[in-house]
Amino acid sequence: MEGNTGICLKGARAICEAVGENPKHIVRLVSRMGLPAWKRDGSGSWRALPDDLKSWMLAQRNTHLGAQ
């Protein structure tokens, strides 16, 4: 994610690679864990903004570090 200069990541694989997750789990990540990704009108490719993904990762880190 650090080297990404694009405005938007497109596709489950690219999004999940950026956050270290399995693309097969993207629906669960979005619906249950709040991963900030969406589909236009509910169909097509997944999309996400790199800054949103970074914020989500920081929140995940803080949640799990705080649980120790």
Image (tube, grey):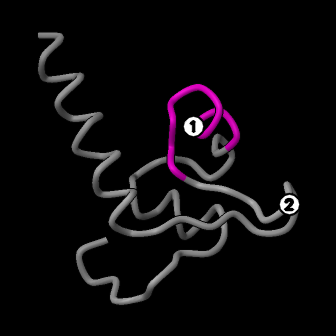
Circle 1 or circle 2, nearest the eye: 2
Q: Nearer the viewer, residue 26 or 39?
A: 39
- Find residue 45 and report its horizontal and vertical position in percent: 76, 69
In the picture, the disc for residue 68 is none
Label 1: how many Cα within 10 Å (few below 14, some 14–19, many 20+) = some
- Earlier-in-chain disc, 1 versus 2: 1
Measuring 66% from the left and 69% from the top, which residue is drawn there?
11
The residue lying at 11 percent from left, 10 percent from top is 68
Task: Report the side of 7 relative to 29 (left or right).
Answer: left
Q: Amino acid at mark 1?
A: Leu
Q: Residue furthest front?
A: 41
Q: CA distance from mark 1 to mark 2?
A: 19 Å
Secondary structure at numbered mark 2: helix
Mark carried by residue 41: 2
Where does the image place residue 3, in percent across and percent down from the top left?
A: 26, 83
Asked if residue 55 is among those painted magenta in the image, a careful observer would answer no
Q: Is residue 35 magenta?
A: yes
Please tell me whether residue 12 is drawn above or below residue 20 in the rendered image: below
The local crowd at label 2, few if under 14, some if 14 to 19, many if 20 or more residues have their Cα within 10 Å, is few
- Could you tell me which residue is drawn at 51 percent across and 35 percent down? 34
**Residue corresponding to mark 1:** 29
Residue 1 lies in quadrant: bottom left
